[in-house]
Amino acid sequence: MKVLVTGGAGYIGSHFVKMLIDNGHQPLVIDNLSRGHKEAVPQNVLFEDVDILDTEALSYTIRTYLPDAVVHFAAYAYVGESVEHPGIYYQNNVVGSLNLIRLCAENGVKNFIFSSTCSIYGNPTQVPISEDQPSNPINPYASTKLIIEMMLKDFETANGMKHVALRYFNAAGADPSGAIGESHNPEPHLIPIILKTALGERKKVSVFGNDYNTEDGTCIRDYIHVNDLADAHLKAINYLDNGNESAIINLGTGKGNSVLDIIEKAKTITNKEIPFEIVERRTGDPAVLVADNKKAKELLNWIPKYSIEEIIQTAWNWHQNPKY
Ligand code: UDP
């Protein structure tokens, strides 16, 4: 299948591209490389340095490649940054996605897979979180993702382009090959920060609050391996290709780990000291985010395979020997 992948040089996108190739598909990656890494895209993969804000280049790419499906990862994805600079989030995520969705819908693309997020739920009223819980974004990043989900619905009504919006919980881990992994600058995510501390690249981990209503007082998150996420995208393409309806689907393991749990497990896996200190809560962090993943199992026949230990282990392999 010909699959256009936006943001294919980014963390989750590059793992998906590798999976596409391993399964005999033909990806065309577009990425403006503002946050992605060219090295994350294998040399034999078609690559265009195209920005989704550049409608002319985007239109040309879609009209000439005529993809069977489009998988849209390209986005800014730092919550804190989105609060400080909402403009670049609305510009890049909302306007960029509008360009892409409109051009795809108008050029006859049939199936569109979108990277959404569990942060759309805001502070959830019930955990585990199912897709029918109300969306209530509490930061601009989450708002942009919700707006894009709404656009997809409207363009389906107008043009018939089907979509699956995949609401990720906490993406983590790296491909077991060691060829690709997570590399953000700055790095805001817990597991890389812990592993960089184990490597001595950072002095200590700041644990954001230990007075939450959880067993050890620290936040609980549902960490999901990046290859399990990638696998769900492949299944989502097949799901639409088989004539099924558009859907919004959570992607998480259904299990939660606290910040202190992760530090403890990382200590065992790395066999290193991981100094930490408790600091103030980070604004906008809900106490517990854990997925109800029944819908993904039912509709996509998707079952996450990686344990939390394997997530940390594969991330550790990568961080000891990052390629970019
Ligand atoms: N966290 C932390 N210290 C850090 C980074 C993250 O205590 O330096 C906590 C954060 O409060 C959250 C969890 O780790 O409860 C996961 O945060 P991350 O930024 O990795 O992902 P998010 O949940 O924000 O998508």
Image (cartoon, rainbow, N blue to C red):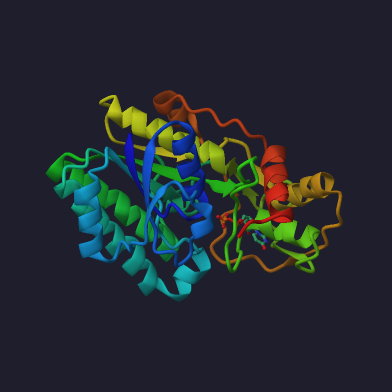
Q: Which residue is rendered at x = 30% and y = 31% of the image?
A: 240
Compared to 88, does 275 lie above or below? above
Q: Residue 42, percent across and down?
A: 50, 48
Q: Which residue is rendered at x = 43% and y = 24% of the image?
A: 298
Q: Residue 193, percent across and down?
A: 69, 60
Q: Residue 291, percent across and down?
A: 52, 39
For the question of whether residue 97 can be seen, the reply is yes
Viewer-side residue, 42 vs 5 = 42
Q: Which residue is rendered at x = 60% and y = 63% of the image?
A: 188
Numbered-mark total: 0
- Left or right: residue 305 versus residue 13 is right
For the question of whether residue 128 can be seen, the reply is no
Q: Residue 255, percent across and down?
A: 62, 37
Compared to 140, does 318 lie above or below? above
Ligand 1 - quadrant of the structure image: bottom right
Q: Residue lying furthest front in this view?
A: 44
- Left or right: residue 306 versus residue 203 is left
Q: Quadrant of the C terminus?
A: bottom right
Q: Quadrant of the N terminus?
A: top left
Viewer-side residue, 309 vs 183 = 183
